[in-house]
Image (cartoon, coloured by chain):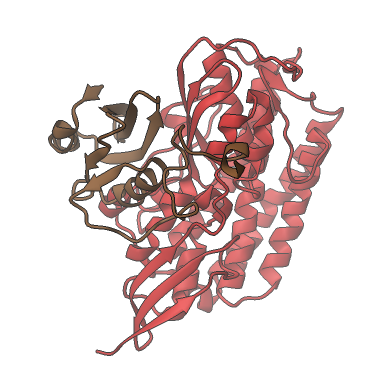
Amino acid sequence: MTITRINIGPIHPSTHGVLRLVADIDGDTIVRVEPHIGFLHRGVEKLAETRMYMQNPPYMEKLDYLAPMSYDEAYVAAVEKAMGIEVKERAMYIRVILLELQRIASHLFFIGTIGNDLGQMFTLFMWAYMDRDMVIDLLEEATGSRMFYVNMRLGGVVRDLPPDFEARTLEKLNYLQKRMGEYESFIEKNPVFGERMKGVGVLSSEKALDLGVTGPVLRASGIEYDVRKNSPYYVYDKLHFEIKILTKGDNFARYKIRLLEIKESIRLVREAFKRIPEGDALGMPVKLRSPATKEKVAVISREVPKGECMMYLVADDQKPYRLSIRSPNFINLMSISHLAQGVRTADLFATLGTLDLVMGCVDR
Amino acid sequence: MKIDRSDLINRVREMKASGYTYLVKITAVDYKDHVDALYFLRDISKGNDAILEISLDPKDLWVPTIIKEHTSADWYEREMSEMFDIEIKNRGAPRLLLEKWDGKSGPLRKSFAWGEDYIK
């Protein structure tokens, strides 16, 4: 056995950001991989301690630029909990609708880029990007921005949904639902996808728990845990949806689970529109002084597209004393050392791709 | 739940045996007069969460590693060690995970000079 050490990175198209992998290979087989992170470490948690409460959401959005609203919402929810602020009912529905649209957009980006990781450039990427753009158009309509929304305010949202938003959203979701079938047949009937995805990068349920992976990666290994179901927030307990579980834990399962989750998110948005009440949804305007905090510590967990994001906020008068962010990408990336053992070098990137990483969120 | 650092490993083992098999996060908070190391554990099947809290003297900052109990502690411990200058005992000297700030560690400590203080 001759071990060769190769350096990959510090940038690779398989990651949305900067990552370096040091891999030991025997012939074409990976023996050991060690990820080197920290290239995008900005010290967001430290920065948060120096900003007033409502100056922080734009920083939170930059954690994961494919699902910015999810992190914005998680942070604002932690501040609301510390201040004891109730979210208006209509605003809860609006948040759920927008967060699920954000999840669809994030998962579509994953489906597009996994094609690139497997050398299938660029048909799938263009398909998924086109469809994602449609969802981004909806988010732009609702928030006024295409990428960084900063749409959450204490107790509500910045603006109510525009007129006829429901009709336009449902029309686009109907189209998207049909497209899911096309994605499935395009990807799953392709022999190259099958060979490089099925049975590759297997993560057993015991190992998934031991490695602490989260979100779709955990559910693809057969563990039934979704914060929206297990610790429901907003109106998720009133809406009907299933936690999708797959048991094989391989690359294919990690792709498929996200496709299934898009379908569930479409279902959630449809139902939320049926139940959304009339009324006021606007949150408090951002002022120089925020309301006083009532609780010293606020812990919030949210199911963001990449997994569970936990915000641990120690509150001070007008600024966070300490904000600790549990990044789902951080812990999912750690599992690559285990997942890549024994796979072929080319499949390392397929395996890495199925973790759906955003390095801005890993490094923080 | 507040515990002493000497009880950490046993407590984590006991909790793991009783269903808390998932480590959610390890982090710390610097309260100036003491530093709290926090261990978030979860019983996935029941959906119960527990927090183990260890209060540390800023002049004697160390905790034992729990990497044998939870592999996921690896990066969390290293991150906490670098960000708070807390030594993790019994796990050697792993490679630096994030980065060193001008040769100093512990940027999330309240005493860490940065911004205008750093320029001075």
Q: Nearer the viewer, residue A14 or B101?
A: B101
Coordinates of residue A44 in the picture (x, y in percent): 57, 41
Q: Is residue B45 left or right of residue A225?
A: left
Number of numbered labels in the structure image: 0
Query: Would residue A188 be visible to someone looking at this image?
Result: yes
As displayed, is residue A19 above or below residue A273?
A: below
Chain given the colour red: A
Coordinates of residue A257 in the picture (x, y in percent): 49, 52
Chain given the colour brown: B
Which residue is rendered at x = 42% and y = 81% of the image?
A: A6
Which residue is rendered at x = 23% and y = 39% of the image?
A: B63
As displayed, is residue A24 above or below residue B34?
A: below
Q: Quadrant of the N terminus of chain B?
A: top left
Q: Quadrant of residue A110?
A: bottom right
Coordinates of residue B6 in the picture (x, y in percent): 14, 33
Q: Quadrant of residue B93?
A: bottom left
Which residue is rendered at x = 54% and y = 69% of the image?
A: A10
Q: Nearer the viewer, residue A355 or A83?
A: A83
Q: Quadrant of residue A203?
A: bottom left
Q: Nearer the viewer, residue B118 or A218?
A: B118
Which residue ends up furthest to the right in the rendered image? Answer: A163
Query: Would residue A358 be visible to someone looking at this image?
Result: no
Q: Is residue B15 left or right of residue B98?
A: left
